[in-house]
Image (cartoon, rainbow, N blue to C red):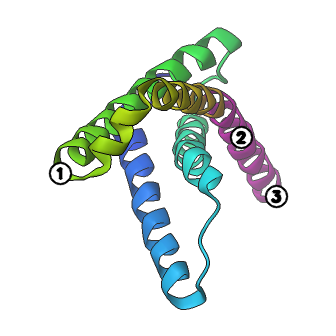
Amino acid sequence: MAVNLKRYGLVYLGTIVGLVGLSNAMVYFLDMSLPTGISTILPAWLAAMTEGQKASDAKAPQYTGPQAWAQARRMTVVVVVINCIFGAIIFIYSDVATLLAQAPVLITALLLIGFAVTFLVNRFALTWGYKVQHRAIVRKESRVG
């Protein structure tokens, strides 16, 4: 079963917006901020978990290894596109462009590492979301029946 890339992108963006709001609220009220690593992993994790759960709800067969890697690749392309759009907006409308121009190789390396981490998170969260939801469905059916 192919993942719904539109839903994946919306969950990904919604998580980012939620994290930005939470981070700003924490800085304002508590004078502390969220760890930066959470903003890299959590949006992809939640979006991929949601897709795995939806596949289980639809009674689709569990993803095999190659299928899961293929779906993770598709989801990572969505993340790359979203980040390129955000990057272009920031580059055009911000003074960050001068900072980024000072170390293009380092910035590119960090982006590639981030996308590789996102790819792995997508792959494993997709299958884990399927398994967790499938177990919950089986438990619920065994209690009812």
C-alpha separation, residue under disc 1 versus residue under disc 2: 45 Å
- Name the residue carrying label 2: 134
Q: Classify mark 2: residues with Cα within 10 Å, few (<14), some (14-19) or many (20+).
A: many
Where residue 21 appears, as percent x and y from the top left, is 43, 72
Q: Classify mark 1: residues with Cα within 10 Å, few (<14), some (14-19) or many (20+).
A: few
* The furthest residue to the top: 66
Q: Is residue 102 above or below residue 11?
A: above
C-alpha separation, residue under disc 3 versus residue under disc 1: 56 Å
Whether residue 4 appears in this view of the structure is: no
Q: Which mark is residue 93?
A: 1
The residue depicted at 46 percent of the width and 75 percent of the height is: 24
Left or right: where does residue 139 sit relative to residue 5?
A: right
The residue depicted at 41 percent of the width and 24 percent of the height is: 77
The residue depicted at 61 percent of the width and 66 percent of the height is: 34
Where residue 97 appears, as percent x and y from the top left, is 28, 42
Counting residues from the start of the chain, the first of labels 2 and 3 encountered is: 2
Q: Nearer the viewer, mark 3 or mark 1?
A: 1
Left or right: where does residue 8 sit relative to residue 61?
A: left
Q: Which residues are magenta?
A: 123-145
136 magenta-colored: yes
Left or right: where does residue 7 sit relative to residue 75?
A: left
- Name the residue carrying label 3: 143
